[in-house]
Image (cartoon, rainbow, N blue to C red):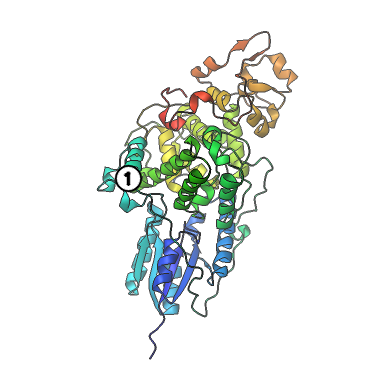
Amino acid sequence: MCSPSRVIICLLRNDLRLQDNEVLLWAHKNADHIVPLYCFDPRHYVGTHNYNFPKTGPHRLKFLLESVKDLRNILKEKGSNLLLRRGKPEDVLEDLVTKLSSVTAVALQEEVTKEELDVENAVKKVCSQHGVQLQTVWGSTLYHRSDLPFRHISRLPDVYTQFRKAVETECQVRPSLQMPDRLKSLPAGLEEGDIPTLQDFGQEDPVTDPRSAFPCSGGETQALQRLQYYFWDTNLVASYKDTRNGLIGMDYSTKLAPWLALGCISPRYIYEQIKKYERERTANQSTYWVIFELLWRDYFRFVALKYGRKLFFLKGLQDKPVPWKKDPKLFDAWKEGRTGVPFVDANMRELAVTGFMSNRGRQNVASFLTKDLGIDWRMGAEWFEYLLVDYDVCSNYGNWLYSAGIGNDPRENRKFNMIKQGLDYDVNGDYIRLWVPELQNIHGGDVHAPWALSNSALAHAGVTLGETYPLPMVKAPEWSRHINQKPDSGGFAARRGKGPSLTPKQHRNRGIDFYFSRNKNV
């Protein structure tokens, strides 16, 4: 008499890839049939926790649907498939376990924040009720949680540099997993499920804007193509440290973050490709800096593991009371790019239209909202959660806590100077004119502070402050040091240079500029 087939369900969440996927590999080794499953959890398409913004915006939803479609195609080529269901994972699993009757285990990748942990606990309960094993794996970071040189996560340093030095000297990155050429098939009789459309979620397809710095599609296939292009086809990775603070176009940074966020590419695979590139082409500060940024991503995930729900608390990790404002008019002007501060407005308009914003832009608009306007940092964090194509809960909230001065930052009261930053990273104003076309006739760096121009200069540019473009909501006193009034020209002297994409020389050898600047007024 034949023994019943062993079936393992692989609940995929933020691990939408075949390569280096321990969930799929473990299931393949321990089952006769495996069921890769993705659930469109309705809780992802409601309002955010505090301010009820939509949780998942159109750019990320489109990217997710593309990623799911790509993974289904990849799995089909390997003799498998991806089941798609709309519903809470715990409910979907209950139905599948009941229907199949031969399920021996459910496998999933662990997450670290509350909503994801709530799902894991609900899944655990279902498994327990049905006598099914729950197998969890850790696969979201470069360094494995079990390999950290801290005896307990509570010993994780509260300063990134201490964490980085410890893992770099005491840890090894585990090799990526070798996947089989063919995967175990699905059991008979399962409907694969249709790929939903944006309209099924009550959203419209976003229009791709030709100005976008991220006009890419979701999925493992596209992620691997992007890495191939950025590393091997163009050698752009060898100058990454010099260009990473750019603002315009695809090539100033790796742009791997959206694929990393959904797990379409593994951080360990990126690391291995960097090491291969260093062996075969060149090893320099730029190639190291890609690893440096992956470590930041790791750090924020481990910080979330250490602090739990404090990541989302108003007082932050430091339990620090700050008299935050909740002024809807100020916030609306910020989110719509109507603050009257061109560097802020350009970045916020780019985010709204494309779902993407440069790292440099994110640091500045977050500083402006929290430090110049004094608005509740959670409003900004939840707005980013809604719109960012590369939204990652740990990195997003970790960075916002930094900006608000209530996170892991070793120094207090860091504040960005919008004019200095604009002139440092968009010296000729090209980025502003790209996204704030009403200022396109103001030439050079003068566009960073139109209020400093004479009436005649503004009239010549066709700008009427307060009508065609807003007056600034605030003017921080420190900005004036970077606006040199010149009565004869009606403007101010901007630093001259070649384009907006190169990191200024004085910044190139800092750690991450945002976190390790010696000058608090950066």
Please say if 227 is above or below 240.
Answer: below
Q: Residue furthest left?
A: 151
Q: Position of residue 204 (x, y in %)?
A: 64, 53
Crowd tier of the residue under label 1, counting other residues whose Cα lies within 10 Å: few below 14, some 14–19, many 20 or above: some
Q: Residue farthest to the bottom?
A: 1
Q: Which of these two is toward me, 88 or 148?
A: 148
Question: Residue beneath label 1, please?
Answer: 307
Which residue is depicted at the point 61% across and 37% down?
A: 349
For the point 55% across and 24% down, the residue is 424
Give SS at disc 1: helix
> What's the residue at 36%, 28% (across, down)?
411
Please state the horizontal and vertical placement of residue 235, each as a whole percent of the image: 58, 42
Could you tell me if residue 49 is visible in this image? no
Tell me which corner region of the image, top left, top right, bottom left or bottom right, holds residue 246: top right
On the image, the x and y values in percent for residue 364 come to 51, 31
Image label count = 1
Of all residues, the one furthest to the front in this rendering is 280
Depth check, front residue: 316 or 299? 299
Q: Is residue 300 visible?
A: yes
Outermost residue to the top: 488
Q: Quadrant of the N terminus?
A: bottom left
Query: Residue at coordinates 70% horizontally, 27% vertically from top-left?
Result: 440
Residue 387 x, y percent position in the rendering: 55, 45
Q: Is residue 163 left or right of residue 337?
A: left
Q: Is residue 123 above or below residue 415?
A: below
Which amino acid, mark 1? Tyr
